[in-house]
Amino acid sequence: MEVDREFLISVARQALEMAIAPLSGYLVGAALLTAEGKIYSGCNIENTSLSMSICAERVALLKALSEGEREFKAIAIVSSGLSHCSPCGACRQMLYEFAPHIEVIMTDPKGRVISTKIEELLPFPFER
Ligand code: THU
């Protein structure tokens, strides 16, 4: 099954509209595609207790995992920032653990798309 990148990005853009980011003002949306073609979306959710804030990618991943999904193909990430939103270290680690070959698709406000693999973003990962 081919990944429809543009469609996945459009779902991430819709998810961004739900972002709760009063502290940073930086809105993020993510759309996670399962091996069977289902899409789970997520947005960043901030909390006044800053360390409890969570990124859009992990919201999407946790939603999918909690619904029993275990096989993932791709994740699209969009933000309100001026350039591509590359996943933070914590998200890379979690994506790697649950989807070690996932395609990571990022786009900037001009619609320029970068597509890479989680292995490229997290070389020499922690593994037990
Ligand atoms: N954020 C994400 O949602 N995903 C990332 O990959 C990087 C950062 C969020 C966390 C916080 O709510 C805001 O962006 C600013 O750091």
Image (cartoon, grey):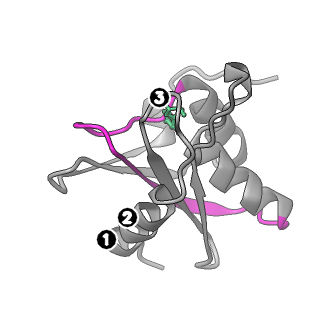
23 vs 102, nearest the viewer: 23
Residue 57 rendering spot, x and y as whole percentages = 58, 46
Q: Residue at x 73, y 62 (%)?
A: 64
- In the image, taking residue 31 as reference, residue 7 lies left or right, namely left
Number of numbered labels in the structure image: 3
Q: Residue at x 63, y 42 (%)?
A: 45
Residue 23 rendering spot, x and y as whole percentages = 53, 28
Residue placed farthest to the left in the image?
110
Mark sitting earlier along the chain (1/3): 1
Q: Are marks 2 and 1 in contact (CB under 8 Å)?
A: yes
Residue type of the residue flagged with mark 1:
Glu
Mark sitting earlier along the chain (2/3): 2
Using the numbered discs, state the Cα–Cα distance from disc 1 to disc 3 in whole angstroms: 27 Å
Residue 65 rendering spot, x and y as whole percentages = 79, 57
- In the image, taking residue 90 as reference, residue 83 lies left or right, namely left
Determine which quarter of the picture holds residue 73: bottom right
Q: Around disc 2, counting alpha carbons within 10 Å, would you say few (fewer than 14), some (14 to 19), or many (20 or more)?
A: many
Q: Which residues are magenta?
A: 67-88
- In the image, taking residue 35 as reference, residue 28 lies left or right, namely left
User: Looking at mark 3, is its residue's CB closer than 8 Å to ligand 1?
Assistant: yes
**Mark on residue 6?**
1
Query: What kind of element bears circle 2?
Result: helix
Using the numbered discs, state the Cα–Cα distance from disc 2 to disc 1 in whole angstroms: 5 Å
**Mark on residue 24?**
3
Query: What kind of element bears circle 1?
Result: helix
Residue 44 rendering spot, x and y as whole percentages = 57, 44
**Mark on residue 16?**
none
Residue type of the residue flagged with mark 3:
Ser
- The reply to whether the magenta stretch includes residue 50 is no
> Which residue is tagged 2?
9
